[in-house]
Image (cartoon, rainbow, N blue to C red):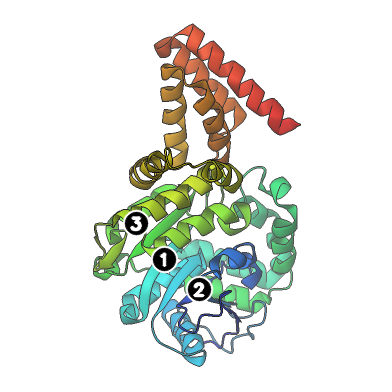
């Protein structure tokens, strides 16, 4: 066993601020630094970002011997030390998330925060990883293309983001076969379930709604064990960085900035946010759900008479309620639609039909929700709501 040599790319902070904090991003097995490319522009607005390749992936050389996850985490620390050292934020997907958990149990003093995305304290079984390693050694990474597409992406993702998803699958062909197999060996041995109680780093756990490799219940259980905020990205599979990059960027940035009620100052304990932090958290979520164009238009219409109201809804509706970890955004969209139908608020309903689509609901699910309200809110109200939804869908189609 030995510490593998890793290569990285450092993306400077957009502002050029000399004291910008470092954010390290870890990739999934079989991918390269390009896994995080769709988020780089947003993440570098306030952070210096380091992306690294796993052994034998991308720019990192082929390892000379087997390695453990602990040794891989040590290799990541060597990269950080090479670019200035000190404490840093970390976010990782799948195997990259496992590296983050290993850092949290072995080197907690170096971590400012941790985001574990579609990963877990133990992923799969040793037998399963051994079988995949045998397959790759016999038939190469090309033999994984079909199964990887099914594991990595939810239905429709390939069509929604063809450039990024196709690129990821093509890059899998260039991964060194033996290096991939050795990564499988490290994952087969990885298990920090009995060490989770010692993790005190402020943490975020993100699941993909339709991830079969690391299903939502695995992330939810992990979040409970390490006192982390738990988020499910609707309609996503195993690689939300490619499927819903903006949504993931919003969640990661909110976590890094500690601007939500989930923010932690020490030992994973929730701190009380200031009014300004609650407003900022609300604005982040409001933009993520309603879109920048809608929020910018609303802000442009603010007058002295409406300023207090806009501040009120941003802080309380979006900053206090929509940021709460108890319900995911898909569920909140279902509830919001039902409430708006019941109250006959068709103007707001149109806005939240669009928001529901952003939060991962399908048109069929929205129609089903409105049909359900006919029983409890009345047929006329549901009929008007369905007409409003049709107008929204028609506008989007145009």
Please tell me in which quadrant of the rendered image residue 61 appears. bottom right
Residue furthest toward the top? Answer: 379
Q: Which mark is residue 283?
A: none
Q: Nearer the viewer, residue 224 or 304?
A: 304
Query: Is label 2 in a helix, a strand or a loop?
Result: loop
Residue at which label 3 appears: 276
The number of callouts visible is: 3
- Relative to 55, is 320 on the left or the right? left
> Where does residue 143 sit, x and y in percent of width and height?
71, 62
> Where does residue 266 sit, x and y in percent of width and height?
25, 69
Q: CA distance from mark 2 to mark 3?
A: 21 Å
Q: Nearer the viewer, mark 2 or mark 3?
A: 3
Q: CA distance from mark 1 to mark 2?
A: 10 Å
Please tell me in which quadrant of the rendered image residue 390 appears. top right
Q: Is residue 309 visible?
A: yes
Residue at which label 1 appears: 256
Q: Which mark is residue 47?
A: 2
Instruction: Mark 3: give few (<14), some (14-19) or many (20+) Cα within 10 Å.
Output: few
Q: Nearer the viewer, mark 3 or mark 1?
A: 3
Which residue is found at the position 72% from the left and 68% from the top?
Answer: 171
Residue furthest toward the front? Answer: 304
């Amino acid at each position: 066993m030995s510490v593998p040599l890793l290569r990285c790319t450092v993306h400077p902070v957009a502002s050029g601020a000399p004291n910008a904090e470092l954010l390290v991003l870890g990739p999934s097995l079989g991918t390269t630094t390009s896994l995080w490319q769709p988020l780089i522009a947003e993440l570098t607005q306030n952070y210096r970002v380091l992306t690294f390749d796993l052994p034998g992936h991308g720019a990192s050389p082929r390892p000379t011997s087997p390695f453990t996850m602990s040794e891989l985490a040590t290799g990541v620390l060597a990269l950080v030390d090479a670019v200035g050292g000190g404490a840093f934020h970390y976010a990782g997907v799948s195997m990259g998330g496992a590296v983050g958990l290993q850092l949290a149990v072995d080197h907690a003093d170096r971590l400012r925060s941790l985001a574990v995305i579609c990963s877990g304290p133990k992923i799969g079984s040793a037998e399963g990883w051994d079988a995949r390693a045998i397959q790759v050694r016999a038939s190469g990474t090309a033999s994984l293309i079909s199964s990887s597409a099914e594991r990595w992406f939810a239905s429709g993702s390939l069509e929604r983001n063809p450039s990024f998803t196709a690129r990821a699958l093509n890059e899998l062909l260039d991964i060194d076969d033996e290096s991939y197999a050795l990564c499988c060996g490290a994952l087969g041995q990885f298990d920090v379930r009995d060490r989770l109680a010692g993790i005190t780093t402020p943490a975020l756990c993100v699941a993909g709604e339709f991830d079969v490799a690391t299903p939502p219940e695995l992330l939810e259980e992990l979040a409970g064990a390490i006192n982390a905020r738990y988020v499910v990205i609707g309609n996503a599979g195993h690689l939300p960085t490619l499927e819903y990059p903006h949504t993931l960027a919003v969640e990661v940035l909110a976590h890094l900035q500690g601007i939500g009620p989930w923010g932690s100052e020490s030992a994973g304990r929730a701190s009380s946010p200031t009014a300004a932090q609650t407003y900022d958290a609300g604005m982040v979520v409001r933009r993520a759900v309603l879109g920048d164009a809608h929020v910018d238009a609303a802000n442009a219409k603010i007058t002295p008479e409406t300023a207090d109201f806009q501040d009120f809804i941003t802080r309380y509706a979006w900053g206090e309620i929509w940021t709460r970890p108890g319900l995911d955004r898909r569920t909140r969209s279902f509830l919001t639609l039902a409430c708006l139908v019941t109250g006959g608020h068709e103007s707001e309903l149109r806005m939240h039909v669009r928001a529901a689509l952003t939060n991962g609901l399908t048109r069929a699910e929205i129609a089903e929700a409105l049909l359900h309200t006919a029983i409890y809110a009345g047929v006329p109200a549901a009929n008007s709501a369905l007409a409003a939804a049709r107008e929204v869908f028609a506008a989007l189609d145009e």
